[in-house]
Amino acid sequence: MFLLQFFFLFLFGLLVGTFGTMLGVGGGFIHVPFFMLVFHFIPQDAIGTSIGIIFFNTLAGATVYYFQKKMDFELAKKLSLATIPGALIGPLIVQRYTHSFFALCLAIMLLFVAYSLYFKREKASVIEKAGSAEGEGEGAEDHSYSVNLPLGFIGTLLIGFLSNLFGVGGGIIHVPFLILGLKIPVHIALGTSHFILCFSSFLGTLMFLYLGNVQVDFMMPVALGSIVGARIGAELSGQVSGTLIRKILAFGLLFVALRLLLSSLAAY
């Protein structure tokens, strides 16, 4: 039974990691409803376990991007500091969630993500390019750009809170923020975001572990699968129609959001 569950979770992580990397959106917004709907996790455990998975995923990605020199390391170190309040305070706020309240909030967020993936083609295109950035450019040193650091701190601070309040990682918002808000080159933005989210999720994982909200036996197989899937997704990106994948994912998220809405309304 244990081996069957391990294989199932590994396969889930593999699929999420593959498609998430192909679109550059990560998988946190899929992990949380999956744990709640399939394994009936309480919101706190679903969020904490998802943050732990995101840490391993972004650690692997950040390492690759660092050695490929597709990361603004100095900027990443500075902006990482802005994630500390969200990583430390967010898990404490999460403890006050009720199942119905969080299910409602998560459903609304998933509806927004589904809408963005299906209709906001321009934004999705930017994210998709970032997701396939491994074949572009030679490194951060080849580009000249200036960054509005105060704006970067404010944006990263808010995204850091959102990440730990919902267990979604924040990459789906942070990558477009770095590209469109801070004008960072696409292939540098993804590596920079990976480092920042890795730092944030590491602190968040420590906090959730302390609070007893990380299910390690569920976290590790999904994390291992997502790391393998991320490599596959990076290879497949650009070879498969991103538009078709976005639409399939949007419909899937719509279905999950409706399930969460029904479970939330049933509690009232």
Image (tube, helix red, strand yellow):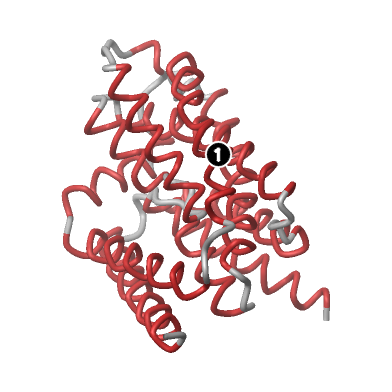
Q: Quadrant of the C terminus?
A: bottom left
- Residue at the spot 43% in from the left edge and 89% down from the top edge: 266
Q: Nearer the viewer, residue 173 or 233?
A: 173
Residue extending farthest right: 2
The residue located at (31%, 19%) in the rendering is 150
User: In the depicted view, which residue is nearer to us: 106 or 244?
Assistant: 106
Quadrant containing the N terminus in the rendered view: bottom right
Q: How many marks?
A: 1
Q: Is residue 50 above or below residue 171?
A: below
Q: Position of residue 93 (x, y in %)?
A: 53, 51
Where is residue 131 shown, x and y percent of the image? 39, 44
Q: Position of residue 51 (x, y in %)?
A: 59, 50
Asked whether, in this view, residue 71 is left or right of residue 146, the answer is: right
215 or 266, nearer to the observer: 266
Please tell me which residue lies in front, 167 or 15: 167
Q: Is residue 210 left or right of residue 51?
A: right
Tell me the SS state at disc 1. helix
Amino acid of disc 1: Ala
Rendering quarter of residue 39 = bottom right
User: Where residue 66 appears, x then y in whole percent?
Assistant: 54, 24
Q: Which residue is mark 1?
A: 87
